[in-house]
Image (spheres, rainbow, N blue to C red):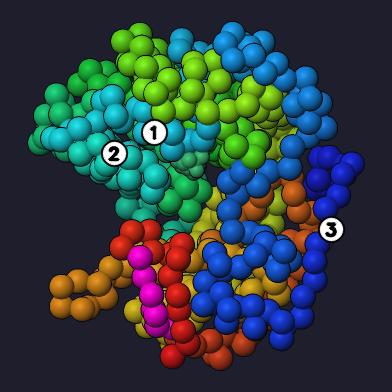
Amino acid sequence: MKTIIEPFKIKSVEPLRFTTESERTDLLRIAHNNPFYLRSDDVLIDLLTDSGTTAMSSKQWAAVMDGDEAYAGSRSYFAFEDIVRDLTGFSHIIPTHQGRAAEKILFSIIGGEGKYIPNNTHFDTTRANIEFSGAKAVDFLTDIGKSPETIADFKGDMDIPTLIDFIEEVGRENIPLIMITVTNNSGGGQPVSMANIRAVRRVCDTYNIPLFLDACRFAENAYFIKLREPEYAHRTARDIAREMFSYADGCTMSAKKDGMVNTGGFLAMNDEEWAMKARNVLIITEGFTTYGGLARRDLEAMALGLDEVLDENYLHYRIRSTEYFGEKLTAAGVPLMLPTGGHAIYIDAKRFAPHIPVHQFPGQSVVCAIYRHGGIRSCEIGSLMFGKTDAHGVHQAPPMELVRLAIPRRVYTQSHIDYCIEVICEVYEQRHHLRGMTLQYEAPFLRHFTARLEYI
Ligand SMILES: *Cc1c(COP(=O)(O)O)cnc(C)c1O
């Protein structure tokens, strides 16, 4: 087998700014040991998120120039609507400025006190929007999906028996819809099988509950189905994606992921009455129905992005290059959550720095060390992000302490990734020097964004 190369060549480049380790030591101190406070100019390779960090193609940039900025009835809207309808089959396509705006609109219509929204795992903004409406967000991930050391094909699958028990317990009238997140971002970017989507659909049919996809990474999920579900091996990713959408009654989408743009999203559905209500909320909160919160040129870029993401040369490279990153680290003994998902690798900080207790933020200590050593920015997903202090001042840790290195789409080449592998391996060799941390400041909500930490 030959090397899998980046399936693009580079027309426009952006220089990287190099810093020294001693500069980064100072920068990190000034940033209170929280890389969210760093200026991106001080970051060499930014793996903080894959959201909105995509490199657009020359065709997308050309389409941006060609956007029709009419307030109503823009040609760019119809180009976007055609692409989304062709892909998803949904009747009503409502553009929004990003994914959470679609969530906000959907749950302000169908959420509310006494309602429950099941999902394999809700993403934070989805959960927050559901709970803001007064409803409860509930997760039904399989046990395998919750086990970081178990290698399995579809660790994003919904736990169907538990879902059914739950519906029986709270009553179908209290469940306005069921969601499936593809791929399961909060669970490590793990895919959901077509068999599982079909099984959830059957549950929805039995109880007459609509099914919505959180479709942010629909193309990566489709490609995993092609690779791992034998009956789909000879189908195209586009065909598989269409089948995934065919089992759903609607979707929310952040196009900052598989839409291959820097901002954008949409809400789509078949139900006429819900769509009418959604458009009314859209007009109040986002903008007119033919632009959402976007410039019309953004709709052009999104339409093309949704098409380009299904190119199998791209998807092959995307999934394989993430796997390559994970493979090399695993070979060096670095403990990861396995198998690697679509958009990121996750270091298991509990095994990376077992000498640091969870209340001293082992993940954040690894995040800081990786930045200090190599200028790479990553993100803690563990006690800093999800931990809580109870009434007795005791730290309540989440089940896992992870460090996420998310890979922007089409931005970094293999040599950038090889460099990241070297840096992480060197930090791993010196892991015994990693020290625990303590919080100096925390905000009441989403504390990881603004927290200030100090070494113990
Ligand atoms: C990013 C994301 C969202 C929210 O989208 P934004 O564009 O960031 O508002 C929702 N669900 C999942 C699974 C995501 O990854």
Q: Position of residue 112 (x, y in %)?
A: 20, 32
Q: Position of residue 425 (x, y in %)?
A: 67, 76
- Which structural element holds mark 1? helix
Residue 166, placed above or below residue 231? below
Q: 138 or 98: nearer the eye?
A: 98
User: What residue is drawn where x is 64% and y is 14%?
Assistant: 70
- Disc 1 vs disc 2: Cβ atoms closer than 8 Å? yes
- Disc 3 vs disc 2: Cβ atoms closer than 8 Å? no
Characterize the local packing of mark 3: few (<14), some (14-19) or many (20 or more) Cα atoms within 10 angstroms: few
From mark 3 to mark 1, how far is it between C-alphas? 36 Å
Identify residue for label 3.
Answer: 15
User: What residue is drawn where x is 56% and y is 91%?
Assistant: 433
Report if residue 439 lies within the magenta region: yes
Q: Position of residue 334 (x, y in %)?
A: 58, 73
- Disc 3 vs disc 1: Cβ atoms closer than 8 Å? no
User: What residue is drawn where x is 84% and y is 58%?
Assistant: 15
Where residue 367 sits, quadrant-wise, is bottom right
Where residue 282 sits, quadrant-wise, is top left
- Which structural element holds mark 2? helix
Residue 423, placed above or below residue 254? below
Q: Position of residue 105 (x, y in %)?
A: 37, 28
Identify residue for label 1.
Answer: 103
- Say if disc 1 is inside 8 Å of ligand 1: yes
From mark 3 to mark 2, how far is it between C-alphas? 41 Å
Tell me which segment is drawn in magenta. Answer: 437-443
As shown in the figure, which amino acid type bears the numbered disc 1? Glu
Identify residue for label 2.
Answer: 130
